[in-house]
Amino acid sequence: MTATSAGTAAGRRVPAADRPRRGRPARRWAILLFTAPFFTLFAAVVVAPLGYALWLSLFREQSSGLGFGGAESVFTGVDNYLRTLADEAFRHGFLVLTGYAALYIPLMLGGALVLALLLDSGAALLRRFFQLALFLPHVVPGVIAGLIWLYLYLPGISPIVAALRDHGIHWDFLGDRVVSSVVNVTVWEWTGYNMIIYFAALQAIPREVLEAATIDGARGVDVALRIKVPMIRGALVTTLIFTVIGSLQLFNEPVVMDGVSDGIVSTWTPNMYAYAEAFGRNDYGQAAAASIMLAVLAGLLSYVVTKWGNKK
Amino acid sequence: MSRPAVNAFLLVAAAYMLLPLTWLLFAATKSLPDLYGTPGFAFAHLNLGANLSAVAAEGDGVFFRWYLNSVLYAGLGAGLGGLISVACGYAFDKYDWPGKDQLFGLVLLGVLVPTTATALPLYLLASKIGVVNTFWAVFVPSLVHPFGVYLARVLSAGYVPGEVLEAARSDGADELRTFRSVALPMLLPAYVTIFLFQFTGIWNNFFLPLIMLSDQRLFPLSLGLYSWNTQVTAFPEYSTLVITGSLLSVVPLLLVFVLLQRFWRAGMTAGSVK
């Protein structure tokens, strides 16, 4: 398997011929040639926009006294940040996001882990079929996943709503409890993806370790929880980081449902808030402040998760 | 857990994953009245042909334009972007220079930056230089894929032994030639893996095109279908267009992934173990 060979190659001590090269002008030119395209573009589309957002967030467009001559930019320091933080809609967006993440992250990653352990357990038949079937939703773009589920939530079209009604359950997928409906869409999209990552990590566990445990009399569930799960901690931490960052950016799925759902407003998540500020109210300063805070939060949370993952 | 219980559980999970796609398949064959009037998982009067021609006819065939755009954004973007990532990751793996670790830290940081945080200022910068609402406004930002550089470094360490490069050098090949004719062929599987990841990333991207583009003819599929869907409340007949269009846009991608399983599995394995 490629992972194991890549892992060991990177980890072993390198013989002299294998050691990375330094010095010699020709080598320096080569390094520049290989890395310059990426870093030039990286500077242009990642670093510069972040810097520009930081700059923008410190200014505010103000129309001059009588409304003549348009607006001018005035330096206002952290004012945009304070305004954004004080805005009821922004805070509500974070509340929604927190509720979403509290439901989505454990459900999705927990589900992915359980499925991966079941697939790895030796009791599973048709392993390749299950892997493929569980992974396929990830290939569907977020917007289209949102559209498909939107129809599966719509009374009149949806076979799910109809089936529930036949059993006397009246569940409004697009009303007050729309958060759980959005969670369902993202769970559908991401469970299989993370399951494959866990499954690959599980398959890389040396079989001797597991055999030793079985000889010692440990049973299936014990082996899974006490031996397998701790051994794939690296994968668990990585997926948690990416899931947290992805959750913070929640936008596509709720935006698709926005038009039909009573439960979703245009500032429903922080990202939707930034979009509405920028393109609904043309307040770029405040939109930039919201984006920066989101990026900082993403950095902070990944740091916390990494620290926590390395400590345990 | 017993063997039947394990398999029953997996079967339920697989059904949950596949049912929405199955429903889409049924729904795309129905006329608008049948969509509302017949059970979701049953065939009604076969209307697929009419739905397909309605999709093709809408807006002078703009749907195929979107299709082409998506293929261009994602195909060219991942094709070129993958090469950029592979070259950069290869340099990180095989060469040494002052400040390398810090620079790689920057790449890793780039993986973590939410793309939506850069999209808005990117729009403002693009409007300053007058490229908003052009092909390039979506294409150029898509080329950058920090995760690809990370993957390329990991995979280069696994696929390209330093001894082979040393042998090429002692045969008189310069650095560029060594990369092109020795390392690159060995990195081909890595390139395909990185290409696939970037391709799906660009194909799924919605936020950037939504912000950058106002001309319908530049839309990728996801944005186009979204714009059709915003009409549904006023014009219910757009439902069949959205449903049939969604099916058409999903099927090729599903096929690609079924056929290229080896490559995305390799990438996900490498990404998880490190």
Image (cartoon, coloured by chain):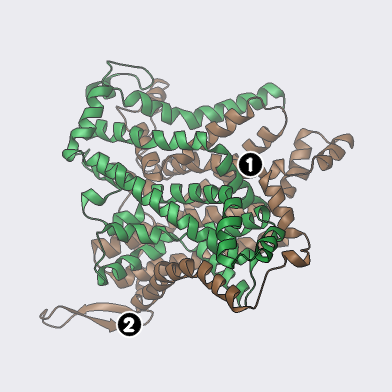
Query: Tag 1: residue type?
Result: Leu
Q: Residue at x 58, y 69 (%)?
A: B105
In the picture, residue B123 is in which quadrant?
bottom left
Q: Which quarter shows the N terminus of chain A?
A: top right
- Say which mark, if any, is on residue A75: none
Q: Which marked residue is nearer to the observer: mark 2 or mark 1?
A: 1
Q: Choose the circle earlier in sequence order: 2 or 1.
A: 2
Q: Position of residue A235 (x, y in %)?
A: 65, 51
- Residue type at mark 2 is Thr
Q: Which of the chains is green?
A: B
The numbered dot on residue A113 is: 1
Q: Position of residue B157 (x, y in %)?
A: 66, 58
Q: Is residue A17 left or right of residue A100?
A: right
Circle 1 residues within 10 Å: few <14, some 14–19, many ≥20:
many
Residue A262, how many percent across, how many down? 30, 44
Query: Chain A shown in which color?
Result: brown
Label 1's element? helix
Query: Mark 2 and mark 1: span between their CA atoms?
Result: 48 Å
| Foreground pick, A109 / A138 | A138
Image point (55%, 27%), residue name:
B12
Disc 2 marks which residue?
A76
